[in-house]
Amino acid sequence: MRYGLATVFVWVGGLKFTEYEIQNAEPLVTHSPLTSVLRRRLGARKLGRMVAISQVALGALIAAKPLAPRASALGSLGAAGMMVGTLSFLVTTPEAWQEGHGVPQLSVLGEALLKDGVLLGASLLTAADALRAAGFR
């Protein structure tokens, strides 16, 4: 689970450097109260790079457990925080939902966001494992 999570963070973080990913993130970041402020101040590309660097760094920290369990725990906790943030997009992004027979349903974008619940759980589990390895009980 740890190295799968680290791989997702490094790989997806690397993709965040591309124009394609910057454009895909626009509906998410422009509707969120927190990221819309960052988007206005930094611009789309700088915000995308900031997220990319953060994700790659978190992935590397998560993978570092054998060498640095405390740093790995911090990486996992940072990843959990990031996943809480991305899950909040389900509430703030109108494009995450579509109308279906009078009942709101997740759109394809909403479904993509929902998977972050699993990544949140994996982040918390890897954080607990790294904290135990670091001597915290």
Image (spheres, rainbow, N blue to C red):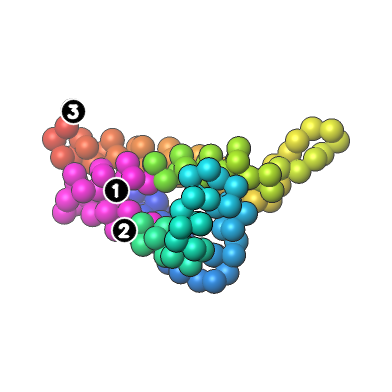
Tell me the tag on residue 137: 3
Residue contact between numbered discs 2 and 1, judged by CB atoms under 8 Å: yes
Q: Position of residue 5 (x, y in %)?
A: 39, 51
Q: Residue 67 vs residue 47: left or right?
A: left
- Tell me if residue 70 can be seen: yes
- Please give the range of residues in magenta: 55-80
Quote the CA–CA distance across marks 2 and 1.
Answer: 8 Å
**Furthest residue toward right:** 101
Mark 1 burial class by Cα count in 10 Å: few <14, some 14-19, many 20+: many
Q: Position of residue 105 (x, y in %)?
A: 73, 38
Mark 2 burial class by Cα count in 10 Å: few <14, some 14-19, many 20+: some
The amino acid sitting under disc 3 is: Arg
N-terminal-most mark, 2 or 1: 2
Q: Where is mark 1, residue-wise?
A: 75
Residue at point 49%, 50% (across, down): 37
**Furthest residue toward bottom:** 19
Give the quarter of the image for residue 103.
top right
N-terminal-most mark, 1 or 3: 1
Element marked by disc 1: helix
Q: Where is mark 2, residue-wise?
A: 57
Residue at point 45%, 61% (across, down): 42
Tell me the tag on residue 61: none
Q: Taking 20 as reference, is 24 above or below it?
A: above
Residue at point 46%, 53% (across, down): 38
Element marked by disc 3: loop
What is the count of numbered marks? 3
